[in-house]
């Protein structure tokens, strides 16, 4: 399976930040090696420009969220069809920051994932337990419920990102054993071809160890995706696939 390394820029990035992708491409010697895939999810303002500019270098572009409807009276929202029109290939749905800041529950996340599929794009569906869930020994139960509630029943390609809420932006990560246990559990619930990403404080220094875990098929990277010099070693730490 080809590993997928996705960068989630969150609410960061101005036109000047496109230079980071140019410098990433220079580090790749012109294009991403074909034994791995790279997706950058910039803020919506940069999706069209980046998708146009980098269409030849194998850098794929994704949105960070979308509305469940295709169009209509939803001021400030963006649809999967619009992201597709702008050149995106992926859309993150159900990120814990959306679940927490915008009250998105599993049903909403599932509706968004279906909208992404309807637009012909690939959803990256995020799940993950809180620190309290983990301490209470409920991590597998919570993630199992999130998977049941937010992953549509489909034959189309989807990507699942396991992101423990307490590991996002904190510098903390689960133990390798805990990552392995969770990814084996998620694998038991989804089809063999579905790529499972780990996310939460992935950095150059821990990427190789995490990406070597069975059933970890890539990473969803926040803070360390903003600068080419931080992101490049993470992309290259993934074992190549086909
Ligand atoms: P982080 O964020 O890498 O900054 O922890 C990951 C994410 O939220 O996708």
Image (cartoon, rainbow, N blue to C red):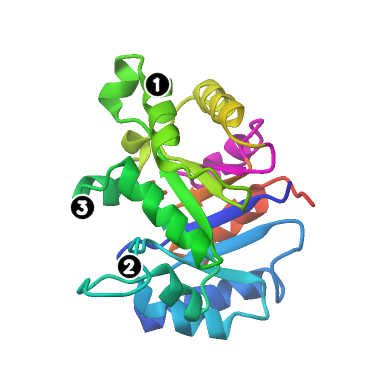
- Kindly state the secondary structure of the residue where label 1 is placed: helix
Earlier in the chain: of badge 3 and badge 2, it is 2
Name the image quarter holding residue 195.
top right
Q: Position of residue 231 (x, y in %)?
A: 53, 58
Q: Determine whether 154 is above or below 78 in the image.
A: above
Residue 182 x %, y %: 51, 26
What's the mark number on residue 102? 3
Q: Which marked residue is nearer to the observer: mark 3 or mark 2?
A: 3
Q: CA distance from mark 3 to mark 1?
A: 23 Å
Residue at the image position 43 percent from the left and 22 percent from the top: 140
Q: Secondary structure at mark 3?
A: loop
First of labels 1, 2 by sequence position: 2
Identify the disc placed on residue 12: 2
Q: Which residue is mark 1?
A: 141
Q: Is residue 34 left or right of residue 3?
A: right
The residue lying at 56 percent from left, 78 percent from top is 22
Q: What segment carries the magenta color? A: 192-216
Q: Residue at x 20, y 47 (%)?
A: 103
Whole-percent x, y for residue 150 in the image:
41, 42
Q: Nearer the viewer, residue 189 or 95?
A: 189
Label 1: how many Cα within 10 Å (few below 14, some 14–19, many 20+): few
């Amino acid at each position: 399976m080809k590993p997928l390394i996705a960068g989630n820029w969150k609410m960061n990035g101005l036109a000047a930040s496109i230079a980071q992708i140019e410098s990433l491409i220079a580090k790749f010697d012109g294009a991403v090696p074909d034994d791995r895939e790279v997706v950058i999810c910039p803020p919506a303002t940069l999706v069209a420009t980046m998708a146009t500019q980098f269409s030849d270098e194998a850098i794929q572009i994704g949105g960070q969220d979308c509305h469940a409807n295709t169009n209509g009276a939803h001021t400030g929202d963006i649809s999967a069809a619009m992201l597709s029109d702008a050149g995106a290939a992926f859309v993150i749905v159900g990120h814990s920051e959306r679940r927490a800041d915008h009250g998105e529950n599993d049903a909403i996340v599932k509706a968004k994932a279906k909208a992404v599929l309807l637009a012909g794009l690939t959803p990256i569906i995020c799940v993950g337990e809180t620190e309290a869930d983990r301490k209470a020994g409920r991590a597998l139960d919570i993630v199992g419920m999130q998977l049941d509630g937010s992953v549509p029943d489909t034959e189309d390609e989807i990507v699942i990102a396991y992101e423990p809420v307490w590991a996002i932006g904190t510098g903390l990560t689960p133990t390798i054993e805990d990552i392995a246990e969770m990814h084996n559990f998620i694998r038991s619930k989804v089809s063999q071809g579905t790529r499972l990403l780990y996310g939460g404080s992935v950095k150059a220094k821990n990427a190789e160890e995490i990406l070597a875990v069975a059933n970890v098929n890539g990473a969803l990277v926040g803070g360390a995706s903003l600068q080419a010099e931080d992101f490049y070693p993470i992309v290259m730490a993934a074992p190549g696939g086909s």
